[in-house]
Image: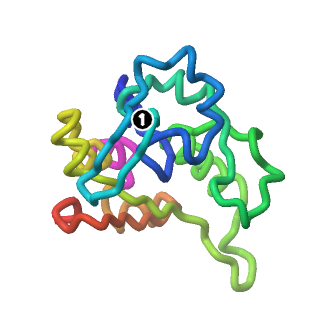
């Protein structure tokens, strides 16, 4: 979640590993954390935590492939979307394309991971689990029945058991 409360679709809690955020080092220097230890004992060095960044700042960076052994042909093409943009796109696809009419068609869905919920609470006072539930409820996707009825099956996972109870 960004500083201004927008849920974004990002695998990491920091920007540098999977974006071109290093291009903004001079501009964002005051937001950079030298060492960031998460509740999972992961370390982030010299990086920008997403809760320190506004949504508009997160939209300025472009996605990059983090691993050298994977293709980087799509680097710098895509911005970080908000979770609302992802859900809106899913709603558009399900309402404009009848995927169920095709033989063996797979209905697209969302696989959401709640990352580092204890760290968000202890460092920023943000309850990511509640924020995600409120978001899903606002979009009519908070239960298996509702999400399936609305055409967007959802799986929510977390390595933190407390986030799922």
Snapshot colouring: rainbow
Residue 75 counted in the magenta span: no
Give the vertical position of 29 relative to 121 (above or below): above
Given residues 162 and 27, the one toward you in this image is 27
Give the image location of residue 46, x and y in percent. 45, 36
Q: Residues within 10 Å of mark 1 (few under 14, many from 20)?
A: many
Main secondary structure of the magenta stretch:
helix
User: Disc 1 marks which residue?
Assistant: 50
| Residue 47 percent across, percent down from the top left | 46, 36
Label 1, secondary structure: give it. helix
* Residue plotted at (58% across, 50% down): 91
| 107 to the left or right of 9 | right
Nearest the eye: 24 or 97? 24
Query: Which residue occupies the foreground of this view, 41 or 141?
Result: 41
Seen at 28% across and 42% down, the residue is 131
Residue at 22 percent of width and 37 percent of height: 126
- From the image, which quarter does the N terminus lie in? top left
Q: Position of residue 7 (x, y in %)?
A: 41, 38
- Which residues fall within the magenta stretch? 133-141
Query: From what the image shows, is residue 44 above or below residue 147?
Result: above
Tally of numbered discs: 1
Q: Residue at x 50, y 61 (%)?
A: 110
Left or right of 163 in this view: 88: right
Query: Is residue 135 rendered magenta in the image?
Result: yes
């Amino acid at each position: 979640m960004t500083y201004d409360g927008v849920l974004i679709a990002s695998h990491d809690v920091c920007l540098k590993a999977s974006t071109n955020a290093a291009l903004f080092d001079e501009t964002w220097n005051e937001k950079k954390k030298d060492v960031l230890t998460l509740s999972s004992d992961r370390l982030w060095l010299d990086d920008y935590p997403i809760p320190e960044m506004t949504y508009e700042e997160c939209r300025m960076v472009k996605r990059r492939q983090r691993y050298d052994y994977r293709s980087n042909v799509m680097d710098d093409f895509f911005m970080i979307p908000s979770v609302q943009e992802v859900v809106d796109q899913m709603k558009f696809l399900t309402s404009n394309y009848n995927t169920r009419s095709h033989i063996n068609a797979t209905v697209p869905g969302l696989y959401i991971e709640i990352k580092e919920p204890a760290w968000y609470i202890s460092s920023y006072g943000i309850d990511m689990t509640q924020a995600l539930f409120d978001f899903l409820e606002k979009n009519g996707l908070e239960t298996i029945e509702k999400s399936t009825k609305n055409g967007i099956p959802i799986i929510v996972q977390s390595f933190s058991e407390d986030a799922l109870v």
